[in-house]
Amino acid sequence: MMNSSRLLLLSARQSHRRLGGVGRSNRRFLSNSSANSKTSAASAITAASTAILVTTAAAAIYNKNNETLHHYYSSPAAALCSAPPLLGAEATMLSPATEPKTGILFPRLCNGMTFVGCGVRVKYGFVKVYAVGTYMDPLAMSSIKTQSPNEIKKALLDPTYPRTIRIVMNRNLSMEKYTAAIIEALEPRMGGQDMNSLEEFKNLNPKGLDLVQGAEMEMTIRGDTLLYKNAVGGIGQIKSLVFTRAMCDVFYGEDAVSPPHLDEVLKGVKAL
């Protein structure tokens, strides 16, 4: 009987040692797996960071004399008019809007701002030159959107309310005619002040380039600063409150270049 008990005890101890060995092996395996997972995660983070750095846009434009090359950097999200949706955001909120006269699409987000309306620029009564859309900062407009249409118009004419104006060509047009038309609209609104900014604007657009149907330009206004992205992706800026105020009047004033665009923006601001 005593021998049988000793045999059972010895067998139990041996089983315990074997199980202990398996446990240690599992712990070593889990430890190695954890280390490998951490290494993989670190590699993934490094790769993602590298991708962000690589894809960061470095857009170049020529200065007034077209001799010196200036670089302006923008984040990948800012470089895209349609920013990636936030997790949990409703897909319907990000579906593009359509300008009805041209069929041109406008994404719901642009440079961190929200779409509020679009319209068409018509020349000579029938030529649909381009579609134009406006994006506003919902937070900046939160106290304005509940006010009267006249108060909303005043805010639209005030460049301290941030916005992006996105122009999409509906037909081919030379760059010279495009810039001449914008400058022609701006000049009488500037009262003879900061007229050199008109030449700056002209030089932000590459010379000798014909705009084709679908070409896009973006003008982001924040106070006295206009950040401009031309049709080939070049980015530059103009610092002039006179210029930005005049640009606001071109698109939101009493003699706006696209009345349908202004009407839609007034309705869109109230719906922000």
Image: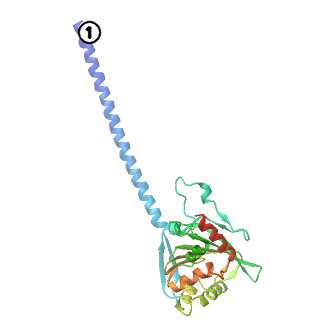
Q: How is the image coloured?
A: rainbow
Give the residue at x 28% y 22%.
14
Residue 56 spot, x, y in % from top left? 48, 68
Q: Amino acid at mark 1?
A: Ser
Residue 193 appears left or right of 170: left
Of residue 115 and residue 145, the one placed in the foreground of this image is: 145
- Is residue 213 something one can see in this rendering? no
Of residue 12 and residue 172, the one placed in the foreground of this image is: 172
Give the residue at x 56% y 85%.
201
Question: Height in image: 249 above or below 29?
Answer: below
The N terminus is located in which quarter?
A: top left
| Residue extending farthest left | 2
Residue 120 appears left or right of 85: right
- Is residue 121 something one can see in this rendering? yes
| Residue extending farthest top | 1
Q: Which residue is mark 1?
A: 4
Question: Height in image: 148 above or below 88?
Answer: below
Q: Quadrant of residue 89?
A: bottom right
Q: Quadrant of residue 256?
A: bottom right
Residue 260 appears left or right of 23: right
Q: For mark 1, does the 10 Å Cα neighbourhood hold few (<14), some (14 to 19), or many (20 or more) residues?
A: few
Residue 182 spot, x, y in % from top left? 63, 84
Residue 40 appears left or right of 198: left
Mark 1, secondary structure of its residue: helix
Of residue 28 and residue 124, the one placed in the foreground of this image is: 124
